[in-house]
Amino acid sequence: MTTKTPDNIKFKMLQAKAREIGFDVCGVARPKIDARNQQRLDEFVAGGEYGSMAWMNDPERLPRRRDPEILWPDVKSVIVLGCNYGPAENPMALLDHPDRAMISVYAKNKDYHDLIKKRLKQLARWVVEQSGGAEQVKVFVDTAPVLEKPLGQASGIGWQGKHTNLVSREFGSWLFLGEIFTTLDLPEAEPEIDHCGSCTKCLSACPTDAFPAPYKLDARKCISYLTIEHDGPIPLEFRKPMGNRIYGCDDCLAVCPWNKFATRTEELAFIPRVELTAPRLADFLDLDDAGFRAFFTGSPIKRIGRAKFLRNVLIAAGNSKAPRLIPRIENLLSDESALIRASAVWALSQLMSAAEFASLKDTHAKIESDPVVLAEWDQASNAA
């Protein structure tokens, strides 16, 4: 005869197993999104602040995002897990080196989705085994309409800061999140309270003023959105503020005072590759498609493709004040991608004198016959 394990012991066992597998934090929440966060989601969608991320307004996905029980009616508990990816260095240090490329901390090595999903599955199997196969589980890591940050706050592992990201008293702004939905009825944690107080450093640090108010993000202005999700040319008003940020942006995360308690990650997959710690813009300008794919194998950067990546690099090159890049950029005026050609025109308009730029039409006849590039050339010429 077996005796039922008390709920608090059950939760401690879960936490211990999670840490053994490699998670740094573990909490449990009810499968509910509170009214305040439902309202924030509705306002975000109604205002079109999701930009081109049409899935945010998908009529099938939106109700599931607002209510986890619509996503899976049988769910009783949500186990929220986090992995520390804290950087060893200040993520904003390269702002003082405009000829170098700034890449978001999370993207300087392996794609975290792969590692975390494996760990989630391992813990989920353990949960099922502990129940004798009586319970069911589903795992999510950015793969379904899950409002993971409100669930993270409800689970007690952190709170959603004014920059809309999760903040931890132990790990600051540097946590990767994943969730296990389960039919197991686990004791819910005490929700973490908001410790932002009157601080607004994250809001004022944003280079593009992407926060219309605390706890509200307009993705259309966010450099992370612009460099990763946005298709087509970067809107002119955001090119200068992008500086040398070529993939993502960590400014609002990096300035958070709670990072004083953060520690460097010990996970090898999250420690930056040497060649991505302070890469030269010049080295990326020569990447062909095969070279891009090979260099970023296993990296989240590979997902955006060479055209969008070089678009970002060319914006940074235009902001670099490094005329030595001009020959490499000129080579891209004949690239097969119209997006790259157009971005090269803008970069050259920033690095060349007015006379040199005006002569481009004479040396690159294709500008006249390429509507996309010609439109960019006319815009740059008018702005000069």
Image: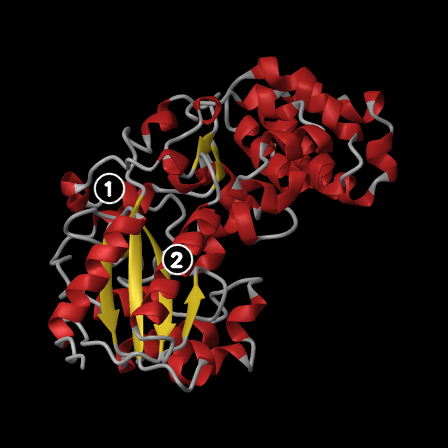
Q: With 75 as the anchor, is 9 left or right in this view?
A: left
Residue positioned 40% across, 77% down in the render:
136
| Residue 263 visible at all | yes
Q: Is residue 191 visible?
A: no
Q: How many other residues sit within 10 Å of disc 1, few (<14), some (14-19) or many (≥20)?
A: many
90 lies left or right of 68: left
Which residue, given by chain and number where applicable, does mark 1 sit on? Answer: 255
Residue drawn where x is 25% and y is 73% of the image: 29
User: 282 or 67, which is in the foreground?
Assistant: 67
**Badge 2, how many Cα within 10 Å: few under 14, some, many 20+?**
some
- Front disc: 2 or 1: 2
Q: Residue at x 58, y 19 (%)?
A: 282
Residue pushed farthest front? 1
Q: The N terminus is located in which quarter?
A: bottom left
Q: Toward the viewer: 247 or 27? A: 27
Q: Note whether 279 is above or below 44 in the view shown.
A: above
Check disc 1 and give the amino acid type: Val
Give the image location of residue 16, x and y in percent. Answer: 20, 56
From the top left corner, tell me how far across and down residue 88 is, in percent: 27, 30
Asked if disc 2 and disc 1 are in contact, CB closer than 8 Å, the reply is: no
Residue kind at label 2, given as amino acid type: Gln
Q: Where is residue 7 in the image (x, y as percent from the top left)?
A: 15, 75
Residue 347's spot in the image, x, y percent?
62, 29
Q: Mark 2 points at which residue?
A: 122
